[in-house]
Image (spheres, helix red, strand yellow):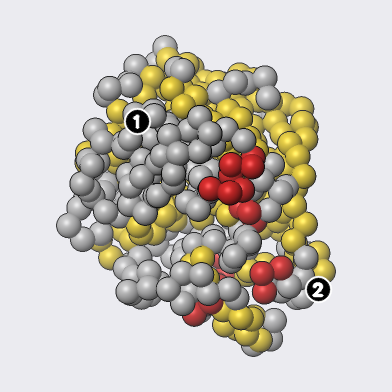
C-alpha cells in the first residue's frame, strides 16, 4: 500500500508492520515463510473461525441441538479456531478496492483500502457450514492537536452461505504491540496502559469464563498503570457492555468505543485501540517464546501485549451470550476495529 506505515501478509491476512515515526510497534517477521514456520504466538494474525477459547473443544448445541467436536489445543479447550485456524490459512489478497472513509474517524486523509477474502468450507476444523470471510484494511492519517496520527481501520465481514443452518463466528486481530519498538526492544517495560473498563469475565483453571462479570482483582485497569519486565500478568476478557444478549451479530453500526490507550516515554509513541465490539482480550504476552529467525532477533515474554476486540469468550456455548456469535444461514457477521498511533 502507498501508506508505508502499514504492511500485510496473505498468510492469516496478517498485519506485518505498524510504523509510528520510524518505530515499528508490532511484532512480526520479514517473510511469509517465517510466519509459517515460527509464528506460534499468532503475531498479527486474523483469528477465526472463533477467536479465543471454546469450552471442552466443542460447539455444544447448535443446528437443532447438535454438538460439534473441535480440536482440543489448549487445556482441553479449542483455541483460536483449532490446529489450522484462519490465522494459519493463506487468504486471497490484498486486493485494492479504492479509497474509503472510516466511520467514527473524522478528517481521515488517504483512505487507501485493500481486501482479503477466505472461503472456509463446511467441516473446516470441525465447524459446520461454509463461510465466506472478508478482512478490509483502510489506512490513512488524521490530525490530532497538531500531531499526525497513523490510522488503520479493520472491517470484518463473514456470511454463512451453505452446509448448515447455523455456525459460530468470532473474528479478531492478534497483533502484539510494543511501543518501545519491535522487534529490537526486548520488552515493553515502561509502557503505561489504561483500559476502558475494569469489568472482566473471571475464568476457571482452563481459562473458561465462569459466567460472572466482576472487577478485575488486584489492579484497577481503568486507571493508568505501568507495565514492567515482571508484571502485571493479565490474559483476560474485559467487557464493555452490561447486557450480553443485546449485542447484534453485526456490530458495524455500533459506535466506536475506546478499548485501550498506551504510551511509552522513551519513544514518545502513543497507541489507541477502538472497536464496535462488546469485549476485548487483554494479554500481556507472558507466553511469547520465538527464536531468532533471519534478520529478526528472538522474542520472549513481555515483548508485546495484545488487545483483541471480539465477542465474549465461549459465548457460543452459553445461553444468553450465544446470540453474539451464532450466525444463521444468510446472515452477515460484522465488526470494526481502529488502531491509532502517533508520537510526541
Secondary structure at numbered mark 1: loop
Residue farthest to the right? 162
Numbered circle sitting on residue 163: 2
Looking at the rendering, which quadrant does residue 239 occupy? Answer: bottom left
Q: Nearer the viewer, mark 2 or mark 1?
A: 1
| Mark 1 surroundings: few (<14), some (14-19) or many (≥20) residues within 10 A | some
Q: In the figure, 175 relative to 50: above or below? A: above
Numbered circle sitting on residue 185: 1
Q: In the picture, which quadrant includes the N terminus?
A: top right
Q: In the figure, 186 relative to 320: above or below? A: above
Q: In the picture, which quadrant includes the C terminus?
A: top left
Percent position (x, y) of residue 315? 50, 70
Residues under labels 2 and 1: Cα distance?
A: 47 Å
Q: What residue is at 57 percent from the left and 33 percent from the top?
A: 30
Percent position (x, y) of residue 232? 23, 50
**Foreground residue, 42 or 331?**
42
Query: Mark 2 vs mark 1: which is more N-terminal?
Result: 2
- Proximity of marks 2 and 1: CB atoms separated by less than 8 Å: no
| Mark 2 surroundings: few (<14), some (14-19) or many (≥20) residues within 10 A | some
Q: What residue is at 63 percent from the left and 68 percent from the top?
A: 168
Q: What residue is at 24 percent from the left and 33 percent from the top?
A: 190
Percent position (x, y) of residue 88? 63, 54
Amino acid at each position: 500500500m502507498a501508506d508505508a506505515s502499514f504492511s500485510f501478509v496473505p498468510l492469516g491476512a496478517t498485519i506485518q508492520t505498524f510504523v509510528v515515526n520510524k518505530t515499528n510497534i508490532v511484532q512480526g517477521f520479514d517473510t511469509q515463510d517465517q510466519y509459517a514456520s515460527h509464528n506460534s504466538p499468532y503475531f498479527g494474525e486474523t483469528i477465526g473461525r472463533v477467536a479465543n477459547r471454546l469450552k471442552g473443544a466443542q460447539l455444544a448445541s447448535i443446528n437443532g441441538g447438535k454438538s460439534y467436536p473441535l480440536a482440543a489445543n489448549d487445556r482441553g479447550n479449542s483455541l483460536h479456531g483449532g490446529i489450522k485456524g484462519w490465522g494459519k490459512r493463506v487468504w486471497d489478497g490484498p486486493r485494492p478496492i479504492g479509497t474509503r472513509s472510516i466511520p467514527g474517524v473524522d478528517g481521515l486523509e488517504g483512505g487507501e483500502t485493500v481486501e482479503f477474502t477466505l472461503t472456509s468450507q463446511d467441516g473446516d476444523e470441525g465447524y459446520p457450514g461454509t463461510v465466506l470471510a472478508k478482512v478490509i484494511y483502510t489506512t490513512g492519517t488524521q490530525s490530532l492537536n497538531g500531531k499526525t496520527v497513523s490510522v488503520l481501520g479493520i472491517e470484518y465481514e463473514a456470511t454463512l452461505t451453505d452446509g448448515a443452518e447455523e455456525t459460530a463466528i468470532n473474528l479478531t486481530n492478534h497483533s502484539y504491540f510494543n511501543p518501545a519498538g519491535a522487534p529490537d526492544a526486548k520488552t515493553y517495560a515502561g509502557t503505561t496502559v489504561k483500559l476502558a473498563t475494569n469489568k472482566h469475565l473471571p475464568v476457571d483453571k482452563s481459562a473458561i469464563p465462569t459466567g460472572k462479570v466482576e472487577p478485575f482483582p488486584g489492579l484497577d485497569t481503568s486507571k493508568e498503570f505501568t507495565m514492567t519486565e515482571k508484571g502485571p500478568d493479565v490474559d483476560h476478557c474485559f467487557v464493555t457492555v452490561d447486557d450480553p444478549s443485546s449485542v447484534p451479530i453485526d456490530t458495524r453500526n455500533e459506535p466506536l468505543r475506546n478499548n485501550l490507550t498506551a504510551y511509552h516515554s522513551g519513544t514518545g509513541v502513543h497507541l489507541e485501540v477502538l472497536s464496535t465490539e462488546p469485549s476485548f482480550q487483554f494479554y500481556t504476552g507472558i507466553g511469547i517464546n520465538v527464536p531468532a529467525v533471519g534478520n529478526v532477533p528472538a522474542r520472549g515474554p513481555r515483548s508485546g501485549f495484545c488487545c483483541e476486540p471480539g465477542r465474549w469468550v465461549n459465548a457460543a456455548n452459553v445461553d444468553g451470550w450465544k446470540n453474539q456469535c451464532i450466525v444463521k444461514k444468510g446472515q452477515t457477521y460484522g465488526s470494526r476495529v481502529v488502531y491509532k498511533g502517533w508520537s510526541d
